Image (tube, helix red, strand yellow):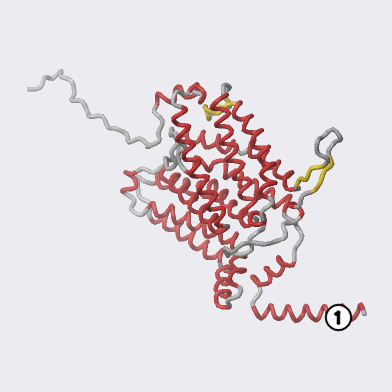
Amino acid sequence: MHKEGGSAPSTPKVRRRKHPNEIPSETTKTNGDHLLVDDNSKYKSMWIRTYSTLWMIAGFVFIIYMGHLYICAMVVVIQILMARELFNLLRKVREDQHLPGFRLLNWHFFFTAMLFVYGRILSQRLVNTVNSDKVLYKLVSSLIKYHMVICYSLYIAGFMWFILTLKKKMYKYQFGQYAWTHMILIVVFTQSAFTVANIFEGIFWFLLPASLIVINDIAAYLCGFFFGRTPLIKLSPKKTWEGFIGASVATIISAFLLANVMGQFEWLTCPRTDLSAGWLHCDPGPFFKPESYNLPSWSPWKEISIMPVQWHALCLGLFASIIAPFGGFFASGFKRAFKIKDFGDSIPGHGGITDRMDCQMVMAVFAYIYHQSFVKPQSFSVETIVDQILMNLAFEEQLELYRRLGEILQERRFRQT
């Protein structure tokens, strides 16, 4: 018999599944006072981080050697891996079990955005690649003409797919996933897509900004490792003023020197106007031609040669050392909001792909805007006009333009004589 005053039977505790990179609660309480210089296991983590860094740099150098298309493929793979990490961040397994196929909707929007952005960036270069084949040229021209219609139709199909899959008691989760997907496309994918635009303007404009972010990250880590004592920002407790200042000096100096080294290779400075994989030869332009500067009489050298692009590199270095780290601070605050240490664990000692790309995205947008505003000539060239004619006019219209242009030139010639 049970006693009337007896205690109620205890209910079993339900364990909450933690994110694989979630920070324990006891760690988050004291994390603000934890500096890298006081970390007892810092040497072990440093060797793991160094080993991973060397492998990444070796692979990166090999891909740079292979050329523009391989670099673009690398960027696409990185974008897909970043999207997977971020999609999984807010994923709830129990809810997904009641929504079969809902995960595919995220990737549908992702690849639709990829088709739209890369179609806009690479359309002219695709035309230049196939203009020698009449059949392919007509097919590509038609696809480019209706490119926006195709992308919009795919997006609307995804929108209708989302509406038709809405389920009762799941509305909040589904709309949250819909907003989360679009945030990823705007904040992550759109910014990183500028990287591909920089690649085709010349590998130099991709490699230099990316290298400066890597140098800044390494220098900040080393300076903070050995000298860091003064916390920089609460969002990222291991960041110190010593690391920030030391990395800034190292990054700006490296920018000036690296621009001189990279500017001597046509493979890095020549823009790619098509999607071929052959070696490039071009006139590097005035920005990559050294100019001599006379030095004071007390200097051991009479003059020094500096490429004009090196002065522009100083601006890139300044941005990479002062502004771009705020992309990392944003990511740190984001991870704290979701109580995770890293976005993933695919890179030993570094975390996930997104953890390495936070500053790179900010830098890629600035490098593109800076190049378009202060470096790229704004006047139309013969090549640009010819490219527009080939892309926008049919073959018969091109012949008509050729005939009328000939008549105009003949009239001007007779007037001059």
Q: Position of residue 218 (x, y in %)?
A: 56, 35
Task: Indicate the quadrant containing the N terminus: top left, top right, bottom left or bottom right.
Answer: top left
Question: What amino acid is at disc 1?
Answer: Glu
Question: How many discs mark residues in the rendered view?
Answer: 1
Tag 1 residue: 411
Task: Please say whether residue 342 is visible from this viewpoint.
Answer: yes
Q: Residue at x 50, y 45 (%)?
A: 56
Residue depicted at x 81% and y 39%: 301
Secondary structure of the residue carrying numbered label 1: helix
Classify residue 158 as left or right of residue 233. left
Q: Is residue 338 above or below residue 155?
A: above
Which residue occupies 51% across, 24% down?
A: 35
Q: Nearer the viewer, residue 233 or 71?
A: 71
Q: Decide which of 170, 138 is in the foreground and name it.
A: 138
Q: How many residues crowd around disc 1 within 10 Å: few (fewer than 14), some, or many (20 or more)?
A: few
- The quadrant holding residue 257 is top right
Q: Is 394 placed above or below 107 here?
A: below
Residue lying at the far left in this picture: please name it.
1
In this image, 98 relative to 335: left or right?
A: left
Pick the quarter of the image with the C terminus: bottom right
Residue reaching furthest top?
A: 5
Q: Position of residue 396 (x, y in %)?
A: 66, 81
Identify the residue shown where x is 43% and y is 48%. 84
